[in-house]
Amino acid sequence: MVFKHYKLTLVLVALIVQTIQITCNDPEIRSCGNASIRIDVGDNTVGSEAHISCSNGYTLWGNDSIVCLDSGQWSQQNAYCIPDGIGKPYIQSFDGSLYLFNNFNKSNYSQAKEYCTNICSTLIEINNQVEDQFLLETMNNLEIDVLWIGLESVNGGNYSWPSGNTTQTNQYENWGEVVPEHIKDNPPAGTCVQAFSFYEFWFPNPGSFCDTELDDFVCELR
């Protein structure tokens, strides 16, 4: 009798489990400036797809859909909205990130940062020698001599990247021998940094030099 009751309980539990339907909440939508990702959710049950598109004036790069998983979470988006008219050679992927090499609009350091922010990205953060070599090789391939990167000293005393990492925490830096030691080790507030493909090193620009307009900068989208 106890055994029959146990079997009945298992059957009821199985029926209850079958009637519980896992669903995903509405997916998070990234919106930065005008570069908004649109996600069309027709159904939010497991296995359903939601289709991704960009607002007018932007082209979708990456996957054009996401799937509702058994965990109740949507699969990773890996989708980016890039301004129309940017040729494919200027969009490169490396080690899980997408890089947009901008050479169509002269920009000072602040303007370059703002442009990247408006497409849900940041000026490039270089974490190691391999990534640095990728940057320099791409610059050479695209015939870019110098560009803005995401390293700066906002308040003075140290250099930091958009993520908050520093050259100390990343344990990587690539200063040229011509850079004075006091600028490397104790930069003044407002120092921004360029990368030179010909010399294959970074060079800091204290103060008003950051207002110089360069032809190129590179945004990193993660």
Image (cartoon, rainbow, N blue to C red):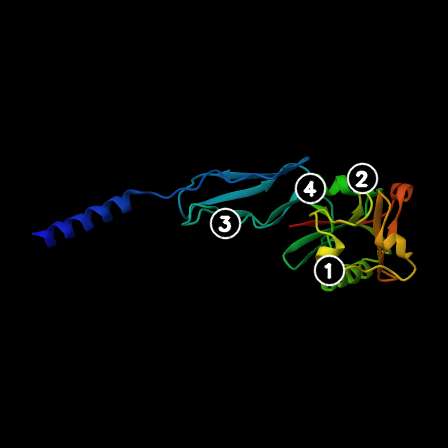
Horizontal and vertical percent position of residue 73: 46, 46
First reached walking from the N terminus: tag 4 or tag 1: 4
For numbered disc 3, what is the local secondary structure?
loop
Q: Please, which residue is most extreme toward the left here?
A: 1
Could you tell me the amino acid type at mark 2? Answer: Gln
Could you tell me the amino acid type at mark 3? Answer: Ser
Q: Nearer the viewer, residue 188 or 216?
A: 188
Horizontal and vertical percent position of residue 15: 23, 46
First reached walking from the N terminus: tag 3 or tag 4: 3
| 4 vs 2, front mark | 2
Q: CA distance from mark 2 to mark 3?
A: 34 Å
**Can you tell which mark lies on residue 171?**
1
Q: Which residue is mark 4?
A: 119
Q: Is residue 207 left or right of residue 83?
A: right
- Neighbours of disc 1 within 10 Å: few (<14), some (14-19), many (20+): few
The residue depicted at 69 percent of the width and 45 percent of the height is 121
* Callout 3 touching callout 4 (CB < 8 Å): no
Could you tell me the amino acid type at mark 1? Answer: Gln
Horizontal and vertical percent position of residue 66: 51, 47
Q: CA distance from mark 4 to mark 2?
A: 13 Å
* Callout 2 touching callout 3 (CB < 8 Å): no
First reached walking from the N terminus: tag 2 or tag 3: 3
Q: Which residue is mark 3?
A: 75
Q: CA distance from mark 1 to mark 3?
A: 33 Å
Could you tell me the amino acid type at mark 4? Answer: Ile
Horizontal and vertical percent position of residue 157: 82, 47
Q: CA distance from mark 3 to mark 4?
A: 21 Å
| 1 vs 2, front mark | 1
